[in-house]
Amino acid sequence: MTQIDIVTAALSTSQGLSDWIQAHHPAKLESSGKKRIAAICYSIALDHREATLLLLQHDARSAAFALLRSVYEAWVRASWAQTCATLAEIERIEAGGFLPKLETMVRKLDTQPETMGAFSRIKRAGWESMSDYAHGEQRQISRWVDATSIGAAHPDDEVAELLRALDVYAILCMAGLLALADLSTEPCLAKMKELFPIPPSV
């Protein structure tokens, strides 16, 4: 498989997942309280992911990489609102107050027995690179410079890996939305196993 085929195949897989999400998205979601804030944040994450696919279809790779952090942050906020947020915190958010800092949410999520510290591990593994891409720092700049010219040069294998990470977050967000709607999350587990026979790192 050539390098261009790698990106084309990854985009095709991601678009297929988008179609699957549209077909399985719950029709009705809770309109107030913790469930509403969580559903909003999951939906924001999915919205950013769709924008990323559009950017990559137009080969706007730097902008696509910059959105990965937005997808990740929206997923963390949704997970926190769904499982950890107190009534007082939700009421403050709905009244227009500030959300807790992301690190505070990550620490709180890691106190949940079922997470086994996964949220802090994911943040440690990807935060620096996501931030560099989001803010135009070293990693982003380095993808524009080579020995002979200046121009966007995100390697194709990195684009494929970006799409892989976005697809993982998309399935996790769908699982969250299905749970909020009191529906089985089994379709999400099946889709994760289908797309990622080897457990992915996000």
Image: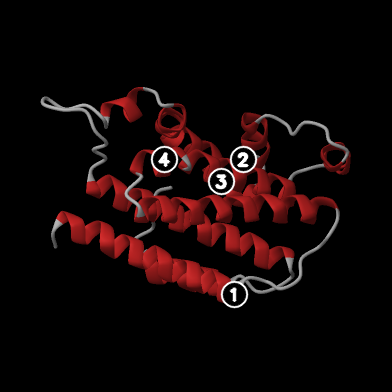
- Drawn side of residue 54 relative to residue 80, left or right: left
- Drawn side of residue 82 relative to residue 61, left or right: right
Mark 1 or 3: in front is 1
Disc 2 secondary structure class: helix
Residue at the image position 34 percent from the left and 30 percent from the top? 140
Residue 110: give x, y in percent of width and height. 62, 40
Q: Please name whichever residue, 25 or 196, is drawn nearer the observer in this view of the structure.
A: 25
Q: CA distance from mark 4 to mark 3?
A: 33 Å
Above or below, 178 against 173 in this view is below
Q: CA distance from mark 4 to mark 2?
A: 31 Å
Q: Which mark is residue 24?
A: 1
Residue designated by label 4 = 63
Q: Amino acid at mark 1?
A: His
Mark 4 and mark 2 lie on one chain; the one further toward the N terminus is 4
Mark yes or no: residue 34 visible: yes
Residue designated by label 2 = 110
Above or below, 20 against 104 in this view is below
Q: Amino acid at mark 3?
A: Met
Residue at the image position 59 percent from the left and 58 percent from the top? 173
Mark 2 and mark 1 lie on one chain; the one further toward the N terminus is 1
- Drawn side of residue 159 relative to residue 135, left or right: left
Residue designated by label 3 = 116
